[in-house]
Amino acid sequence: MGNYLALLIDGTGVVRNVHRIECVHDIDAVECLKDLLAAIDGFELGEVWRGRDRIGKIIAPRVGPISNEDSLAPCLEDRPAP
């Protein structure tokens, strides 16, 4: 069984929380990180480390659906033609 560390990082890029994860495979540790980010508010992203090796980096899921205001389409329409 592998021994991993999950680092939870806030919006300023500072590690604010560390969790020890014990999983058999790397992908299981990354899935565990996804669950942590979904369950704990206030973190922008997380990383999973096994020793000195970073196994994965995940951006925290957005709260609620993405609205039309978040779309990039209006930005693209305002661009001048090449």
Image (spheres, grey):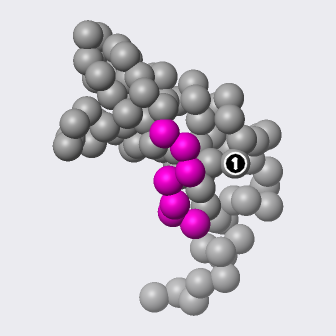
Magenta region: 12-18
Residue 22, x across and y down, in percent: 37, 16
Q: Position of residue 45 (x, y in %)?
A: 52, 48
- Residue 10 lies in quadrant: bottom right
Q: Nearer the viewer, residue 40 or 72?
A: 40
Q: Tell me which amino acid carries mark 1.
A: Gly
Count of marks, rendered view: 1
Q: Quadrant of the N terminus?
A: top left
- Say whether residue 38 is visible: yes
Of residue 71 and residue 27, the one placed in the foreground of this image is 27
Residue at the location (53% across, 87% down)? 81
Nearest the eye: 34 or 52: 52
At a point 59% along the width and 84% down the height, the residue shown is: 79
Residue 35, position as x, y percentages in the image:
57, 25
Q: Residue at x 52, y 60 (%)?
A: 14
Q: Which residue is mark 1?
A: 42
Per the image, label 1 sits on a secondary structure element best described as: loop
User: 48 or 20, which lies in front?
Assistant: 20
